[in-house]
Image (cartoon, rainbow, N blue to C red):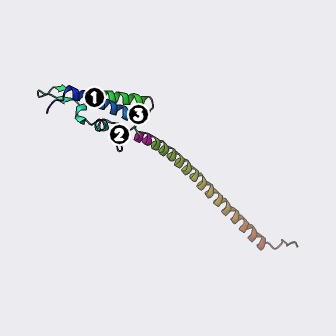
Amino acid sequence: MARIGEETRTRNEQAIRAAMDQLLRGDLPPGGKTDLKTLAAAAGVTRTGFYPKKNRDGTSRPGPYQHLAEEFERRLKALQDAGEIVDPRDAQITRLKAANSDLRERVAKREARIVELVEFQTLALSRIAAQHDEIRRLRSALANAGNVRTLR
């Protein structure tokens, strides 16, 4: 594989830095993320330049743009540590996780309330049944007793 010239390397590094700034501002292309794949596509370079290479003797050497990949990861981590979410997908995931947590909490509270209401319903029905039995007993006692007179 042919090596790139100094002028091409400088032009590519400028394109990578411009694309890096664009991605870290949150200006992502459709379907893109804040990652090296999208950075390479936005800069118009191959992604392999961001990773270390192997020499013929098996030793490793840095890729031509590996230092820029490390800078990109470092800047992205600094933004994330500062609480800034660069990737709109990540912001959406964070928002959906919070909404999911809130909904789970609401469902748990409603389920607890339903349990309380079912217990109350059971207690109320048993009390009504006991009262009904007492009323029937008193009516039958009234009907069977001969010494009770009805007042007009």
Q: Is residue 97 above or below residue 21?
A: below
Label 1 sits on a secondary structure element that is: helix
- 5 left or right of 124 in image: left
What numbered label is drawn on residue 13?
Answer: 1
Magenta-colored span: 88-94
The residue tagged 3 is 25
Q: Is residue 10 above or below residue 146?
A: above
Tell me the kind of residue under disc 1.
Answer: Glu
Query: Which is nearer the N-term, disc 3 or disc 2?
Result: 3
Q: Foreground residue, 71 or 125?
A: 71
Q: Can you see residue 62?
A: no
Q: Looking at the image, which residue is at 37% across and 39% down?
A: 28
Report how far apart the C-alphas of labels 3 and 1 lie in the structure: 18 Å
Task: Please give the count of numbered marks on the rendered protein.
Answer: 3
Magenta: main secondary structure equals helix
Label 3 sits on a secondary structure element that is: loop
Q: Quadrant of the N terminus?
A: top left
Label 2 sits on a secondary structure element that is: loop
Q: Residue furthest right?
A: 152
What numbered label is drawn on residue 33?
Answer: 2
Tell me the kind of residue under disc 3.
Answer: Arg
Query: Which is nearer the N-term, disc 3 or disc 1?
Result: 1
Q: Looking at the image, which residue is at 85% across and 73% down?
A: 150
Q: Residue furthest left?
A: 57
Q: Looking at the image, which residue is at 78% across and 70% down?
A: 142
Q: Is-magenta flag for residue 144?
A: no
Q: Is-magenta flag for residue 90?
A: yes
Q: Quadrant of the C terminus?
A: bottom right
Q: Foreground residue, 87 or 45?
A: 45
